[in-house]
Each structure stands twice: as structure tokens, then as C-alpha cells.
């Protein structure tokens, strides 16, 4: 029960109003030390309830004894890597603060600069992305000397996006404060350096390892011969799997646009989201998916963070993500809050090594799956290697036994029947390639 925490009565009232009954593991672990004012480094998977784990202690601290009602200054700063995640967090803060006098504001790119500057003079809690906040700091619009609580949410992703220097500069601009740092993964050296610089004598809470993805999510791979084959597999999965909403991830904007066009032409209600889209289009894509106006979102990794859509139960990796952490963030979109989900990765010969390295990173083995109607030639290098060894061994034995008989046998075989050329398809599926005859022929 949330009543076990030493929270202000107005916050407990909001928690009850929102039907929060039992705290999640990350909330149970992080809220007590955060209420004591300790710096925290928390590693918890996406969808585990970590937003409430830092929002409730933050609000409790700002409420204090209620005597600070007349203060007009930024007393808490929450940094996030993307606009979508910042917007989502603002809504959560407003929900928990609904019975208090505390006001929150949002500062991200794509909005009027002067309006944001005026708004920041009237709020207690500032939520934003590092890049835009640095612009305001350079313009003299961002007084942070009275900040009491600083939160880094999705800190690992923030560093991946190149915000390390901006985030540290903002931390240095804050007055004496408590720092709460949350991430979905342990990150690399960059995150460790950031922790050392921004946290003072922190308490470390590891609520999950990267291998503990959402328990309700099945993880599968399907081998494919080339990109055109992958497109056929996407069509089949979207037509035959049971889902309310789905995301198809690609690694490039060009592939996202191409796949989106093919889906729309086939009558699929879809939308596309990538870094070239402006804020209006990005918001429209996510809103339509949440509202059910579209069932499928084709996206690059720009959508892998800050996307909390109820009923999202199918994730397809058209391209394998480039790292294990990115895989975790993509797959974290589904199977949330105890729900069930399916994650399918499409693997051709250029993806296999990356897929294998992600399996090792997660200490898992993905379920192998075959779609009978679309079974391809490529089944992975191990199978090919094994069959190649067997064939080579057999040939060698025949030649050794009697080279003359082998030559005679070769002559009897004769040329291939007309009209049955042996062909392979190029990697992108754009053109057939004639297969070279083996040396033995």
C-alpha cells in the first residue's frame, strides 16, 4: 500500500484517486530512500512504473510544510531525452500534483521560444530536453540556482543521443540539490562517468538486468533471404497475428518510408515516425496510434523511447537494432504492466552476427520460427556450414576412391535441362543473380 510511505496527504489522495494500490518493485525500492533525500542511481526496465518512483518523492519534497506556496522559482528539473517522453512525464506530474498548488511546465524543441521563457517564470517543476534547455540557458532564461531536485530519466538514452555535455552543464547550474538518475540499462563508460560527476554518495538500485525483459513478451526470430522477403513476412505477420497495435522498427528513414508506403498501398492503417518528421507530425502519429485510428506504426529508433501506448502488443524488428540496449528499448514497448506481447526479429545473412551478439548480451536464446507459406532458403550460417561440410566430405571421398569414375560420372550428368536456370536473388531483392557453378561441375 502507498500509505506505507511517508507521503504528504495530498499526494496520498491523488494516488487513491488514480487507483494506485500496490507499489511496483521499483517504486517500493526507490521511494523510501528518495524521501530521505539520498541521491539514487536506479536501473529498471521500461514500463516498470519508475516515473512515479521519482515524481512522488519530488512532489513530497516541494510540498514540505506548505509554507512555500508563494515562491515563484524552478525548484525541480526533470531531464528526458525525447519530446514524447517529456510530454508523457508532464502528464504524470500533473496527475500526481492535482491536489497541490505545484505547477509544472514543459520545454522542448518545436515550440515558441518566447512563450516558453515567460512560462518558466511561473512554475515550480520544469520538464524538458537538454538541447532546448541549453538554448534557454544561453539566452539567460533559465535560472536554476534554486533547484532542489534534479532528475535524469532514461539517462542511458540521453547519452546515446549525445546530450552528455548539455546534461552535465545543466546539473552544474543547479543549486545544492538531490539527484535521481534512472535508466533502463547499465549503459557503458559514458554513463558511469556521468554518475560519478552528478551523483554524491549515491545508493544504487538494480531492479532488473538486461536479460530480464518483460516476462509477458515472447521473443522470436524468422530468417529471411533479402529485404523483399522481409516485407512479405511483415505483411503476413500483420495479417495473421492477433494484436491491437503494432510497431515495425527499421534502422533507416528511407526503409521506414518505403515500408510505410507499401503497407498503406495494401490497405493497412499505418503511420510513419522518424527523425525527419516535425513535432506536429510526430505528435499526430502517436496520438492516432493511441486513439486506435491507426493500428501500425512504422518507426526508426526515435520512437523507441517515450512511447507509452496502451494495448501495444506486437513489435517487429524489420532491421535488427545495432546494440543490445537498443533491442531492450524496442522490445520494452510491448508486454507492459503485466500484459502479453510478441516481439519478432527478421534475420537475413547480414543480421545474423548482430542477432547472435544480442542473444549473448541478454544471455537468452530467441525462439526460432518458420512461416510455412514464406519459408526462405537462408536458415542461418550454422546450418549452411554443417551441410557444406557434409557435402565436401562426401565429394572428397568419391574423388579419392576413383578419380576416373568420378570424371565419368560427371560426363554422364550432362548439362542442366533447359528452362531451369539456378538463380539467387540479390540482397535487396531487386534483381536475380546467376549462381556460379561449383568447381566440381
Image (cartoon, rainbow, N blue to C red):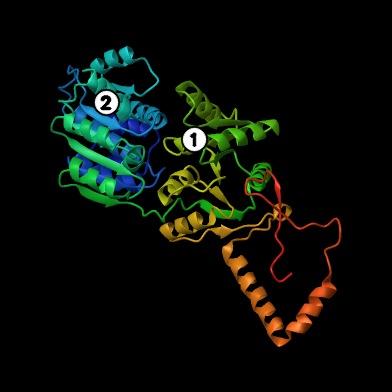
Question: Which residue does the image show at 32% across and 38% down from the upper left?
Answer: 153
Question: Which residue does the image show at 56% across and 50% down from the upper left?
Answer: 345
> Which residue lies most toward the left here?
176
Q: Nearer the viewer, mark 2 or mark 1?
A: 2
Of the numbered discs 2 and 1, the one sitting upstream in the chain is 2
For disc 1, the marked residue is 309
- Residue 357 place in picture, x, y as percent: 45, 58
Relative to 362, is 219 on the left or the right? right
- Residue 183 place in picture, x, y as percent: 33, 44
Relative to 28, is 234 on the left or the right? right
- Check disc 1: other Cα within 10 Å, few if <14, some if 14-19, many if 20+: some
> Which residue lies most toward the bottom here?
401
In three-dimensional space, the C-alpha distance between marks 2 and 1, rounded to whole angstroms, equals 29 Å
The quadrant in which the C terminus is found is bottom right
Secondary structure under badge 2? helix
Residue 61: quadrant of the picture: top left
Whether residue 99 can be seen here: no
- Residue 123 place in picture, x, y as percent: 26, 19
Whether residue 314 can be seen here: yes
For disc 2, the marked residue is 134
The quadrant in which the N terminus is found is top left
Question: Which residue does the image show at 17% across and 33% down from the upper left?
Answer: 172
- Check disc 2: other Cα within 10 Å, few if <14, some if 14-19, many if 20+: some
Residue 20: quadrant of the picture: top left
Amino acid at each position: 500500500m502507498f500509505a506505507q510511505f511517508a507521503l504528504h496527504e495530498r499526494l496520498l489522495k491523488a494516488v487513491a484517486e488514480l487507483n494506485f494500490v500496490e507499489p511496483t518493485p521499483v517504486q517500493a525500492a526507490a521511494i523510501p530512500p528518495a524521501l530521505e533525500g539520498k541521491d539514487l542511481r536506479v536501473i529498471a526496465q521500461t514500463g516498470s512504473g519508475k516515473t512515479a518512483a521519482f515524481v512522488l518523492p519530488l512532489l513530497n519534497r516541494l510540498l514540505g510544510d506548505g509554507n512555500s506556496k508563494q515562491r515563484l522559482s524552478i525548484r525541480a528539473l526533470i531531464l528526458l531525452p525525447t519530446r514524447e517522453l517529456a510530454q508523457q512525464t508532464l502528464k504524470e506530474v500533473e496527475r500526481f500534483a492535482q491536489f497541490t498548488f505545484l505547477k509544472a511546465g514543459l520545454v522542448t524543441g518545436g515550440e515558441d521560444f518566447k512563450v516558453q521563457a515567460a512560462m518558466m517564470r511561473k512554475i515550480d517543476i520544469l520538464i524538458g530536453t537538454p538541447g532546448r534547455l541549453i538554448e534557454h540557458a544561453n539566452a539567460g532564461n533559465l535560472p536554476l540556482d534554486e533547484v532542489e531536485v534534479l532528475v535524469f530519466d532514461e539517462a542511458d538514452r540521453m547519452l546515446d543521443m549525445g546530450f552528455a555535455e548539455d546534461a552535465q552543464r545543466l546539473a552544474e547550474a543547479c543549486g545544492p540539490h538531490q539527484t535521481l538518475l534512472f535508466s533502463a540499462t547499465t549503459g557503458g563508460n559514458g554513463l558511469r562517468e556521468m554518475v560519478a560527476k552528478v551523483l554524491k554518495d549515491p545508493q544504487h538500485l538494480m531492479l532488473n538486468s538486461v536479460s530480464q525483459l518483460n516476462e509477458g513478451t515472447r521473443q522470436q526470430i524468422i530468417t529471411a533471404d533479402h529485404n523483399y522477403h522481409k516485407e512479405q513476412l511483415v505483411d503476413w505477420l500483420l495479417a495473421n497475428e492477433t494484436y491491437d497495435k503494432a510497431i515495425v522498427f527499421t534502422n533507416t528513414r528511407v526503409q521506414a518510408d518505403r515500408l510505410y508506403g507499401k503497407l498503406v498501398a495494401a490497405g493497412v492503417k499505418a503511420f510513419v515516425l522518424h527523425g525527419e518528421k516535425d513535432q506536429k507530425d510526430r505528435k499526430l502519429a502517436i496520438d492516432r496510434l493511441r486513439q486506435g485510428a491507426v493500428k501500425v506504426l512504422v518507426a526508426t529508433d526515435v520512437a523507441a523511447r517515450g512511447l507509452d501506448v496502451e494495448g501495444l502488443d506486437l513489435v517487429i524488428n524489420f532491421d535488427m537494432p545495432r546494440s543490445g540496449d537498443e533491442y531492450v528499448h524496442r522490445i520494452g514497448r510491448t508486454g507492459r504492466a503485466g500484459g502479453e506481447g510478441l516481439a519478432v526479429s527478421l534475420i537475413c545473412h547480414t543480421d545474423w552476427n548482430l542477432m547472435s551478439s544480442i542473444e549473448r548480451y541478454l544471455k537468452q536464446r530467441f525462439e526460432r520460427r518458420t512461416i510455412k507459406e514464406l519459408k526462405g532458403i537462408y536458415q542461418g550460417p550454422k546450418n549452411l556450414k554443417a551441410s557444406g561440410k557434409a557435402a565436401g566430405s562426401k565429394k572428397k571421398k568419391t574423388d579419392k576412391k576413383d578419380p576416373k569414375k568420378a570424371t565419368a560420372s560427371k560426363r554422364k550428368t550432362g548439362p542442366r535441362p533447359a528452362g531451369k536456370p539456378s538463380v539467387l536473388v540479390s540482397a535487396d531483392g531487386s534483381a536475380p543473380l546467376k549462381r556460379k557453378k561449383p568447381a566440381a561441375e
